């Protein structure tokens, strides 16, 4: 009787151990991958800088925000990164700012870095991606890309789509050395001229 009770206890302990192993399996480490897409949508000029705009998309909402995106130009040899990396907004949009405008003519693309949004031993990975190729060619009739052709632009090399000219001297405020004092052509500012006399 004691022997059979001992076997019964041993069998019960084995059964309890198997259940414990099965239960710990529920929380075991795992990896889930969520595909992501990135699109380079447009390039604009802002205060003399180039701004590349784009959008990240994923089936998982948590994969939209806080993603690292870089823009590259395709060249012979290693591709050339444009400006610094950008971080996506909550809707997945991003803007990469690069000093100077226009950018060199050529092919551009965005690279989206993968990101782990899991906790502890649960790896939930938002996938990396490469965007479409964006072909850029500057418009020779609008050097500063502000939407005003050079022939009518009061600051042809500095973006100023508003064409503001407070002193009505023909030079836009964005490129006028003295925007509140008329100095048509290349004349010095009236205050500078008065100091010379």
Image: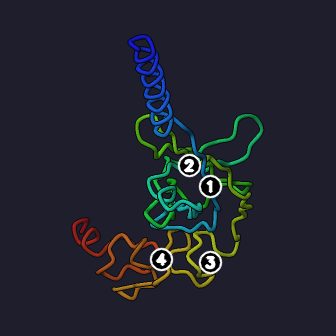
Residue 140 x/y as whole percent: 70, 70
Placement of 184 over or under 95, stated as above or below:
below
Evaluate if marks 2 and 1 touch, with contact meaning CB atoms under 8 Å apart.
yes
* Residue located beneath label 2 in the image: 126
SS at circle 1: strand
Q: Residues within 10 Å of mark 2 (few under 14, many from 20)?
A: many
Q: Earlier in the sequence, mark 3 or mark 2?
A: 2
Of all residues, the one furthest to the top in this rendering is: 3
- Tell me the residue at 65%/62% (across/down): 39
Q: Nearer the viewer, residue 73 or 195?
A: 73
* Residue located beneath label 1 in the image: 36
What mark, if any, has residue 150 been given in the picture? 3
Q: Residues within 10 Å of mark 4 (few under 14, many from 20)?
A: many
Labels in figure, total: 4
Q: Residues within 10 Å of mark 1 (few under 14, many from 20)?
A: many
Q: Is residue 27 left or right of residue 190?
A: right
Residue 170 x/y as whole percent: 46, 84
- Tell me the residue at 77%/38% (across/down): 76
Q: Is residue 14 left or right of residue 59?
A: left
* Residue located beneath label 4 in the image: 160
SS at circle 4: loop
Q: Using the numbered discs, state the Cα–Cα distance from disc 3 to disc 2 in whole angstroms.
A: 45 Å
Q: Nearer the viewer, residue 169 or 84?
A: 84
Nearer mark to the viewer, of 1 and 4: 1
Q: Using the numbered discs, state the Cα–Cα distance from disc 3 to disc 4 in whole angstroms.
A: 12 Å
Q: Is residue 62 left or right of residue 144?
A: left
SS at circle 3: loop
Q: Using the numbered discs, state the Cα–Cα distance from disc 2 to disc 1 in whole angstroms.
A: 6 Å
Q: Using the numbered discs, state the Cα–Cα distance from disc 1 to disc 4 in whole angstroms.
A: 37 Å
Q: Earlier in the sequence, mark 2 or mark 1?
A: 1
Q: Earlier in the sequence, mark 3 or mark 4?
A: 3
Of all residues, the one furthest to the bottom in this rendering is: 168
């Amino acid at each position: 009787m004691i022997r059979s009770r001992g076997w019964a206890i041993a069998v019960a302990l084995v059964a309890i151990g198997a259940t414990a192993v099965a239960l710990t399996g529920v929380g075991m480490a795992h990896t889930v991958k969520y595909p992501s897409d990135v699109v380079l949508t447009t390039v604009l000029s802002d205060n003399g800088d180039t701004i590349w705009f784009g959008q990240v998309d994923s089936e998982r909402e948590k994969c939209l925000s806080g993603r690292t995106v870089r823009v590259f130009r395709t060249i012979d040899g290693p591709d050339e990164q444009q400006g610094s990396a950008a971080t996506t907004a909550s809707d997945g949009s991003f803007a990469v700012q690069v000093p100077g405008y226009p950018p060199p003519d050529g092919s551009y693309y965005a690279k989206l870095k993968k990101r782990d949004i899991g906790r502890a031993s649960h790896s939930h990975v938002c996938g990396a991606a490469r965007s479409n190729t964006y072909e850029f060619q500057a418009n020779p009739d609008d050097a500063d890309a502000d939407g005003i052709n050079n022939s009518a632009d009061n600051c042809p090399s500095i973006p100023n789509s508003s064409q503001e000219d407070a002193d009505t001297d023909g030079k836009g405020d964005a490129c006028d050395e003295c925007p509140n004092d008329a100095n048509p052509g290349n004349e010095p500012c009236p205050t500078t001229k008065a100091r010379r006399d």
